[in-house]
Amino acid sequence: MSDCTLCELPTGGDPHTAPDVDGEFCCRGCLAVARSLDDVDDADDLDERRPESEPDESFDGETTFLRVDGMHCATCESFLELTAAEREGVAAAEASYATDTIRVDYDPDVVSADELAERLSVAGYTASDRADPEPDRDDDVVRFLIGGGFFGMMAMLWYVLFLYPTYFGYEPIADLGGVSGTYLFAQVWVFASIVLCYTGYPILRGAYVSLRARRPNMDLLVSLAAGSSYAYSTLALLVGRTDLYFDVTIAVILVVTAGNRYESIVKRRATGMLSELTTAGDRTVRTESGETVAAEAVDPGDRLLVRPGERVPFDGTVVEGTAAVDEALVTGESLPATKREGDAVRGGTVVTDAPVVVAVGEDATSTLDRLVRLLWEIQSSRSGVQRLVDRLATAFVPLVVAVAVAGAGVTLALGSAPVDAALVGLTVLIVSCPCALGLATPLAIAAGIRDAARRGIVIVSDAVFEEAADVETVVLDKTGTLTDGEMRLVDTVADGASPAEVRRRAAAVERASAHPIAEAIVAAADGSAAADGPTPATDGGAARTAETDPPDDETADGSSPSVADVTVTDRGVRGRIDGEAVVAGHRSLFDGAAWTVPASLDAAGEAARADGRVPVFVGWAGAVVGVLVVGDEVRDGWDEVVADLAEGGRRVVVLTGDAPEAARRFEDHPAVDEVFAAVPPEAKAETVRRIAATERVAMVGDGSNDAPALAAADLGVSIASGTDLAADAADAVLLEDRLAAIPELFAVTRGTNRRLRQNLGWAFAYNAAAIPMALAGVLNPLLAALAMATSSVLVVTNSARAVYAEE
């Protein structure tokens, strides 16, 4: 048995092939994808779009995925990868700050996963198993409010009362000489030291990491400005001078920390809007005898009992019973599949209407587990999206340091005192301290997160604002995204009885079944008499809803039907209503009983199947009198949303695990460029990868089966009515089942990028004017700090405005 050329699943004994496509495929969906996208493998830029580090196929060790708290830029990724590589037994490591994940390939005979976590818990980073609970991140609140705010305020109080008056030629309110002056200066030094070393620790750590990784970032420049003013002031204090610039150190640290803190608060509030979503995994299973055991204790071949409403815990085979299995979570197929003895079932699917006994497969693995692993592999191998300011810092930081050193050297060469030369260099570092530059990105992003949250969109990753602007193709999942993913009665066709009578009798016998299709029919009867709108008669005399029909749960005289002798099979339901035999189910139920089936109803059934829906034939008195059409419905306004997405010049692709018939309605929309149907979940991720080889891709989905594809896309958007796994894989989550939020997301990102460019423009204009003034001696460190603060205030004010209003 070979593996699928696209998704690497087993192809079975009869693989799908075509003369115009190389390879063998597990399903027609994979074949269709390969036919359309196979040529991209030869694209010139394929290697550029794939992660820099690919797992070594020949590696014979193990792989672990660790969550690392404390990463905030691509420099952190490089540092952690270098740190992991230094440990004996590690073959490869790749980190992603966008997902707080590092993938490590290691030899378990040399090093354990626990030892790797300890090794990577350095320099303020904390590594742990991804399955462990999220750590408490309230320490930064204490560090900022107590460490920074309190001690910074105490130091600035002494500056206002004693030091600032002397800078402007006034007498201080107290004598700064003697023991009292020494005591005051010592307090200021202690307070500034606490702010720099405690509150500024994350910034100093970032500077250290950038040096280790040889990738200078903004943390390095901020640390240079704060550290140099602190060092100068400490030396000046020791030699008895009073021109101390500890206030500059405090201001720099607090301004940058405040900006980062504001961004994290806004993001946390937005993320907090996510409700608890359904968890897809099961920790315990039930044996055939009914005993509950841990999932880890199950071995291949064990027989497990799965009751209605429960998930199949592992891939396996049905050995007893028959049931309808909802596979939407795993495969994306909206219609439940009937599983009988000998049929294979996937772990993670849901048994809906009857208990079954499942023999666990050889690998004792769940399809859902494989999807989780695939998701983690994709996430951890994605290159982190480095912030724009960090890219600028690679050139900006060395340039500023060189200018400061050169300015100090020239000043000294022109005959100035060493102290004056040092002040020139210090002033250049302070005035160019990227407070405005450092605030430009986090505040613009915070504004975008805030405006998105107001529209029910949670931005999970900052990468959204960099990726969304370049998206060329939007891939839309069908089930649960373009459609609501719920079985419901969408049409009633009757011939020989009123539509309401057909629904009433069908619902009366279907109440005995727990099948999703039966539940849809019963729900329609209980809800109203109008599952279909007033439509004209069809060919052959079949008519639809009449306004005079009585409610579905009552007869014409208002009484409830009497139901008896109900039998439920995997093909439908039989019973007696008021003594008369009634059958509802598959067309084949009527073949061997010489029942009359009007041609118009046969045509209605074929039309329903052609649309990807399920026809339920209903008959009594020896004749079929109606067809109930069950399926999931498209969401309101889907066509307008697709048109809006296409208006921006983007290609629109529909991707689904459903049969081609169920996706046919989307092929006719002029804004839809391509439809890929019957695509299994593993192939969804590969399909997105192949599209992403030549263009930027956004993927919109809702189910666990979409999670790997969401992670593989440049931009993943999840609908919160889906699962935890899909939300974890996404860069943005739509809290409401409102498709219009997708174009709004792109609008918010465009506005945020404009705001970011405005902030950066001001920050660079400020530096272009301020640095020459510092070199010319026009500014001293105090005025430089004031200019820096003014620049930061303007950036903050600009970022406070709504970004979406600019659309």
Image: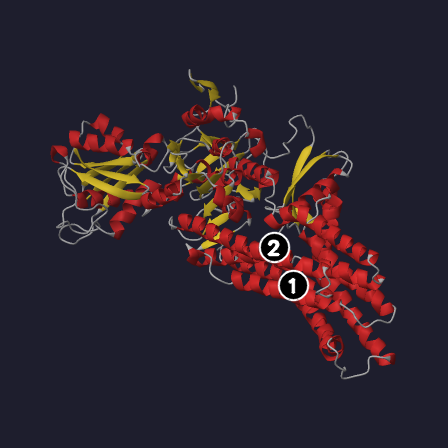
Local secondary structure at mark 1: helix
Expressed as whole percent of the image width and height from the top left, the position of residue 517 reads 32, 41
Q: State the residue at coordinates (57%, 54%).
A: 760
Residue 651 visible within the image: yes
Q: Residues within 10 Å of mark 1 (few under 14, many from 20)?
A: many
CA gap between label 2 and label 1 equals 12 Å
Among the 4 quarters of the image, the one containing residue 671: top left
Location of mark 1 (residue) = 788
On screen, residue 64 versus residue 734, left or right, reads right
From the image, which quarter does the C terminus lie in? bottom left
Amino acid type of the residue that numbered disc 2 sits on in the rendered structure? Phe
Q: Is residue 6 above or below residue 534?
A: above
Expressed as whole percent of the image width and height from the top left, the position of residue 222 reads 70, 57
Amino acid type of the residue that numbered disc 1 sits on in the rendered structure? Met
Residue 354 visible within the image: no
Location of mark 2 (residue) = 764
Expressed as whole percent of the image width and height from the top left, the position of residue 77 reads 67, 44
On screen, residue 426 versus residue 791, left or right, reads right
Among the 4 quarters of the image, the one containing residue 161: bottom right
Q: State the residue at coordinates (70%, 47%).
A: 216
